[in-house]
Amino acid sequence: MPSRKHLVKGLYRAEGPARLKVVEGGFYALGRVFEKGDALVVPRGIVTCIEVDAECIVEGVIGGSLSEARPEEEVIGVWRELSEEVVSRGGRVVVVGEVDSGKTTFSTFLVNTALSRGLKVAFIDADVGQNDVGYPGTIALAVPTAPLSWLGELEPLALYFVGSNTPSGCEDAVILGLCKLLRRAESYDVVVVNTDGWVADRRARMYKARLIEAVIPDTLVVMEGTGASEPLARMFETSRIQVVRAPTPPGAKGKERELRKMRRELAYLDLLRKSAVRRLDVKAIRFWGVCSLNGGVRDEKLESVLSSLLGVEARVEVCGGVMAVIVGDERSYRTVLDAKRELVKLVRREVVVTNLGRLKGLLVGLLDEELECVGVGVVEEVEPHKGYVKLRTPVSVDRVRLIVPGQLRISEEGVERERGLPPLA
């Protein structure tokens, strides 16, 4: 049941899950003022600092906690000044920092501060593994029109499908997607880009440096954290980019690995809940970046050879210098793999082998004829001999022309089953 709390002047820390509605007075949090009738929503695993200037009465349900905070444990005053400074400069803002350094919360400060000034603001969530907007494996553009309690309230205006819950190995895809989404946001006064927490090693720094170079932000916000992002701050200090260091709250609570995984799986469940099984004509689509199932010339003679010599039913397609052998089950897949060396000698081409049985549960992106992402889906069945592909997706497939295989497979219950290279070659 909702309970009332009387808050006097000072700082408070709300740990989610919690929902606090202002009954009398008001408070400042997340870059905005919450007044009578406004509600602050704090998701599970998130901690939000509240600043009360006078007195305030709140009513709500608190599954987490609400407690007084010592000023030395919070940075809300510094963040308030920094967000005003960054927003007054306008333009593009990139926020970088290690995991749990405060990137998402500071991004919320920036968005709300811009809205409070009447500016047109766009937000790009470029964290493929712990995004608040869109689905895991995507980066998303959203356009907030009202003050926020948390970025998860936003609906994506546009998506780019990366297909992995980590940028490692997909750095080029994240940067390309970010550039495409930035083009959609060119008319906005402030564009806030929140990034993932991969910053510590050499490869990560190179990736982030290239991302920043691609965006060319007006402001680079570096969350201090434990100092892992400081090399990025120093790297761009001599450029025209304004580098701003934002402190991480000393009392910040990190999200546990299992909580991160749970958040992703809740997003998968939401995707599946909203989805219906839809059927596409295999002749009307192509699979992005692969040889298999892309309209190559069938080699029925070799199909017959494989059937008689290996005892497997296979579809064989010739795609330039590549021969794609497509089978429907694990036994046939292993059999063809064992014979692959001899097949290469026989056909004098590169041979790739695809097991259609491994496609079930694969997370995929759906592109239209303009190569824009119109949504995501989960593969249910691929039947090239019968001429169709079945997907679970919440979007209409009438405009879909390309299917982008991801690196994640999920179960019907939304559980991540594995991550790795897509089972299409």
Image (spheres, helix red, strand yellow):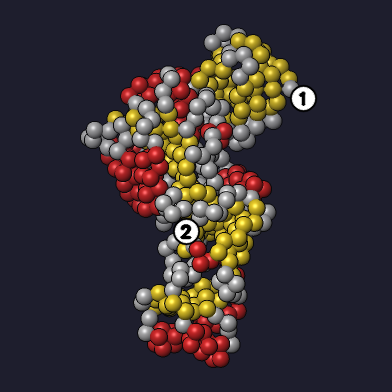
Q: Which mark is residue 402?
A: 2
Quadrant where the N terminus is found in the figure: top right
At 40% from the left edge and 47% from the top edge, which residue is drawn? Answer: 177
How many C-alpha atoms fall within 10 Å of the one at disc 1: few (<14), some, or many (≥20)? Answer: few
Instruction: Name, please, the residue furthest toward the right.
Output: 1
Most extreme residue toward the top, as rendered?
54
| Numbered disc in front, either 2 or 1 | 2
**Label 1 belongs to which residue?**
1
Mark 2 or mark 1: whose residue is earlier in sequence: 1
How many residues crowd around disc 2 within 10 Å: few (fewer than 14), some, or many (20 or more)? many
Q: Which mark is residue 231?
A: none
- Residues marked 2 and 1 touching at CB (< 8 Å): no
Q: How many marks?
A: 2
- Callout 2: SS: strand
Identify the image quadrant of residue 224: top left
Q: Is residue 364 above or below residue 273?
A: below
Q: In the image as oriented, which residue stretches furthest toward the bottom?
A: 309
Could you say where residue 375 lies in the image, as x and y percent from the top left? 53, 49
Query: In the visual, does 143 lie left or right of 321?
Result: right
Residue sitting at x 38%, y 45%: 180
Please state the horizontal and vertical placement of residue 337, each as a whole percent of the image.
50, 80
Viewer-proximal residue, 171 or 231?
A: 171
In the figure, residue 309 lies in which quadrant? bottom right
**Amino acid under disc 2:** Leu
Q: Residue at x 65, y 22 (%)?
A: 20
Give the secondary structure at mark 1.
Answer: loop
Is residue 38 visible in the rendered structure shown here?
yes
Residue 379's place in the image compared with 187, above or below, is below
Residue at image x 48%, y 87%?
301
Q: Position of residue 25 (x, y in %)?
A: 60, 10
- Left or right position of 156 against 117: right
The amino acid marked with disc number 1 is Met
